Amino acid sequence: MPDISSDPSSGFSSVVQMLVRAASAAPAQEALVCGATRLTYEEYVHCVAGLATELRSMGAIGARVAIVFGNSIEYCIALMGGWAAGAQVAPINPLLTADEIAPLLEDIGAAAILYDQAVAALIEPLAERCGVPHRIAVGVGDAQGLLRWRCTPGTISPDMIPQAQDYSLLLYTGGTTGIPKGVNLTHHSGVSGIVQFNTLVPTRKGIERLLCVGPLSHVYSLQVAMYNMLNCGGTMVIVPRYSAEFTLDMLEQERITILAGGPTMFVGMLGHYSIGSRDFSQLRYTLSGGSALPEDTLRRWYAATGAPVLEGFGQTETHGAVSFNPLDGVQKAASVGLATADADIEIVDAVDGVTVLPPGETGEIRLRGPQIMAGYRGRPAETAATLRDGWLYTSDVGHIDSDGYLFVSDRKKEMVIVSGFNVYPRAVEEVLYRHPDVAEAAVVGVPDEYQGESLRAFIVLRPGGNEDPEGIRHYCREHLAPYKIPRRISFVPVLPKTTVGKIDKRRLRDGS
């Protein structure tokens, strides 16, 4: 296993120091690009220092600051400015509803909130109700907003550099139990995670241009996009909101070397009429995370672009990826790769949670390493249930092969018991994705009087595909045991997605 102590980044307490280092090394280098706005590293430091000073005057030191922005340069300035002010920052996705945001704000207890002026009507009454004392509305792209300091000399002073064990982020889980949990993450876990990631997927200093498609409010994009470019002094080009055509345009126009996104992105671009005529010559590799990428999509993307897709695995509780397929090494289809440096991954019996299983056997995935969360905010019992004897129990199911590559089967809680047999929906989805008529598929368990539970498949067809449920079942019979074949098949125009682009299986189950 590589030793991360040899990487100069491992000596830093936070990614704020990475920003300072990048600005010192190449102040005129482009740091952030979004639409018509381009920010150099020197301007980035100016903006962060200016905002940090303002937030400190509002009592941010040692407090929490909420930020509500979509993908934008303002999001990056707000996040880094909050850290330089000595605050723990709680990003909130602006696509959430008032009912979803209210309990988060109540839990955060923020000293200040910064938000996009476009969502002011949503945020302001909630901030008032939750007693947030300082509220800063920002026009995204407005030169008088968070960009007003770009030409005002300012430095990030030593007292603005967070300590390693200070809380950096308060990120809320997707709420698989229906109640989102606040995850306390430290600056040390963030630095450790990006250094670990680079042992498997190294970047070139001052050269990379990364296109960030996924939401920056999600830990995956924070790590592989924002932290990653700060670490190597590269340029992050931000997609405000995904569309296949715009993303393809940016790949060409901005000479992108690394693309970071998720499965929904690939499906959309592969279906775009212009995919065959695009220039992908600058693209070195593509990073995929957030949810599983079907093998067929992976193969089609490589055939269209010549750029390999590297998949990884992580959770909000791990501050990003803890495994990834290596850039220079064997990349295994359907695998989320090897453990990153200083991260330990084991497969244990899903019932007793203790017995370590040998290669090839399926069980619960547990993790250990410096990137693991400090715990859930205000939830000692749930923290104790998840963090046990130094291990983080993921509730994900998978196996490790004889070469050390991790394969994730499914969420432990999504397992369906059909007539006494355990069925992991992803295994069925992989078969459906190989059918020539299927563009997207999701499989869920539904109550069944005879079997206890049965499988229902929701399918989006490719253009020209046939709504032939019996044909789909016949195809499944050729590849699956009888109890794994969906009893019900529904053809739908689109699959519902969560705010971070994952297929929303809860909505599918609730609607079934």
Image (tube, rainbow, N blue to C red):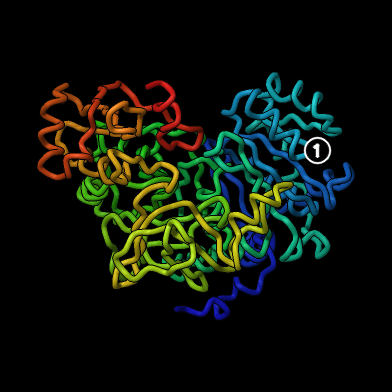
Whether residue 47 appears in this view of the structure is no
Q: Residue at x 37, y 48 (%)?
A: 410
Q: Position of residue 178 (x, y in %)?
A: 56, 34
Element type at marker 1? strand
User: In this view of the protein, which residue sits in the foreground, 412 or 344?
Assistant: 412
Q: Taking 169 as reference, is 280 left or right?
A: left
Q: Residue at x 32, y 69 (%)?
A: 359
Above or below, comparing residue 196 to residue 292 in the picture: below
User: In this view of the protein, which residue sits in the foreground, 227 or 131?
Assistant: 131
User: In this view of the protein, which residue sits in the foreground, 469 or 205?
Assistant: 469
Q: Residue at x 71, y 25 (%)?
A: 123
Q: Position of residue 20 (x, y in %)?
A: 69, 62
Q: Amino acid at mark 1?
A: Ala
Q: Taking 256 as reference, is 277 left or right?
A: left
Above or below, comparing residue 505 to residue 235 in the picture: above
> Which residue occupies the extreme top position in the image?
121
Q: Position of residue 353 (x, y in %)?
A: 48, 61
Label 1, on which residue? 112
Q: Residue at x 57, y 48 (%)?
A: 32
Q: Taking 298 as reference, is 263 left or right?
A: right
Residue 365 falls in image quadrant? bottom left
Q: Alpha-carbon neighbours of circle 1 within 10 Å: few (<14), some, or many (≥20)?
A: many
